[in-house]
Image (cartoon, rainbow, N blue to C red):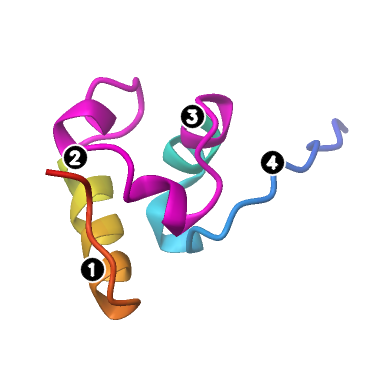
Amino acid sequence: MAIEEPGPTTEFPLRLGKVARRQLAVHGYTTFRQLTEVTAKQLLQIHGVGPKAIRILDEELTDRGLSFAT
């Protein structure tokens, strides 16, 4: 039986999905503060980050008084 390696550590919630969390981390995004420096459109260019992930991230950013760059 294969043992699954833990993914990169991020602030992002589990409901975001494993692929989206991993791909964001691969691209250097591990905190909500870092997401304020990028637009949602730019994040959508990352494989594995789709509209649902953007919606979840937007909700989480709003809850923290933050937003994507414009």
Report how far apart the C-alphas of labels 4 and 3 lie in the structure: 9 Å
Q: Would you place residue 13 above or below residue 51 in this image? A: below
Q: Which of marks 4 and 3 is nearer the N terminus?
A: 4
Report how far apart the C-alphas of labels 4 and 2 lie in the structure: 21 Å
Q: Which of marks 2 and 3 is in front?
A: 2
Circle 2: element type: helix
Q: Would you place residue 9 above or below residue 25 in this image? A: below
Report how far apart the C-alphas of labels 2 and 1 lie in the structure: 12 Å
Q: Mark 1 points at which residue?
A: 59
- Under mark 4, the amino acid is Pro
Q: Mark 4 points at which residue?
A: 8
Q: Mark 3 points at which residue?
A: 23
Segment tinted magenta in the rendering? 24-50
- Under mark 3, the amino acid is Gln
Q: Position of residue 25 (x, y in %)?
A: 56, 35
Mark 4 residue crowding within 10 angstroms, few (<14) / some (14–19) / many (20+) = few
Q: Which of marks 4 and 2 is nearer the N terminus?
A: 4
Q: Mark 2 points at which residue?
A: 40
